[in-house]
Amino acid sequence: PRGGMVTQRIANPFIPVRFWAWPPKLKIIMDIGYFKKIRILDGGMGQELLARGLKAKGSLWSATALIEKKYHQLVVDAHLDFIRSGADVIVTNNFASRRVKMIQNKVEEHFNYANEKAGELAAKAKEISKKNVLIAGSLPAQNDTYLLDPRDKSIIEKGFYDQAKLLKPFINFFYLDVLCGSKECEIALNVTEKFNLPVLIGLHIKKNGKLPSGEGITEVVNKCKNKSWLGIVAACVSPEIIENAIDEMKDLKIPFGYKANLWKTEEPVPIHKFSSPADKIGTNPIETMGTRDNYTDLKFLDFSKKMMNKGATILGGCCETKPLHIKEIAKLK
């Protein structure tokens, strides 16, 4: 619809849906029990964009595709391929567009543009697809990936808030993306509460079954859980670590699942280990962490069947998980 507002009633999980003129501003009341049924999340956008020809600058990784207009269609096409593969949910491509990365790479003036563009491009892909997919707004750990943020609470809170504010007009819910402890989780939830949208929690788990903070999954959930939670996923974690953690997640009695990575390194390292703001062209993370080319779509399907038999209902991928992997597990719906 162009110009004015319409209300449309469509199938569960939506109640009313209101659309405004482009760029679309989605106002959707979600069913908090959405993830009690099998739902398919998308795969790893950053690595997918690199595989399709993105030349990342410095340590900006996927944020380069938002700052530079020539890559915008690449982002839309990657979202579309995940949707066409059967994803029920796509995640906005702003994982690397946190303020600290913008400052390190001397492009902070593009912070607002990049994060808003991430929402806009996801919404554009949804519009083109004509599918009733949901859009999750990525709220990533605000400092280094895979490490607990040691900074002051007010700095972290501002980072989450500034991204959330820019994403909110385009999304159905927030996805706390690869968080490393209850400190970050509590701060992020204080922010998302201000925007009155539900939240899917993505916790990063190590081989010892604990988060980088040293806390267990149950400990973090007990500290942070509130009525806005849609569920919990193991975020950017190997299939083996997910399999080791799945029983504890099941005991939490909330919808659970995973966004599995297919790095060769079982415990991935922070982004600064493989790329520097001084690099004209950013190093592809697979040069440091490798990729599991032998982890086929059928192997990912077998893994997902096992996890579904354990009670997982939220199935998806992260880094190096491609549309072909998502297409196979979408059959489980």
Image: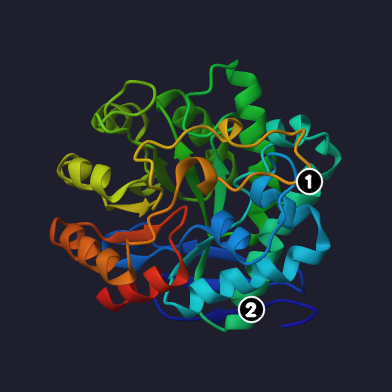
Q: How is the image coloured?
A: rainbow
Is residue 198 placed above or below 178 in the rendered structure? below
Report the side of 293 relative to 98 (left or right). left
Residue at which label 2 appears: 127
- Return the x and y of residue 44 as percentages of the image width and height: 49, 57
Report the side of 179 relative to 232 (left or right). right
Q: Residue at x 57, y 35 (%)?
A: 271
Name which residue type carries label 1: Asn
- Return the x and y of residue 178 as percentages of the image width and height: 46, 40
Residue in front for this viewpoint, 222 or 119: 119
If the image is split into quadrants, where does the C terminus sit?
Answer: bottom left
Residue in front for this viewpoint, 310 or 10: 310
Q: Residue at x 79, y 43 (%)?
A: 280
Report the side of 130 relative to 241 (left or right). right
Is residue 291 placed above or below 248 in the rendered structure? below
How many numbered markers are drawn? 2
Name which residue type carries label 2: Glu
Residues at marks 1 and 2, CA–CA distance in whole angstroms = 23 Å
Q: Considering the numbered disc 1 on the image, is that residue within a helix, a strand or a loop?
A: helix
Q: Considering the numbered disc 2 on the image, is that residue within a helix, a strand or a loop?
A: helix
Q: Can see residue 165?
A: yes
Res 211 quadrant in image = top left
Is residue 104 placed above or below 288 in the rendered structure? above
Res 55 quadrant in image = bottom right
- Return the x and y of residue 234 as percentages of the image width and height: 34, 45
* Mark 1 vs 2, N-terminal side: 1
Q: Residue at x 77, y 33 (%)?
A: 278
Q: Are marks 1 and 2 in contact (CB under 8 Å)?
A: no
Residue at which label 1 appears: 112
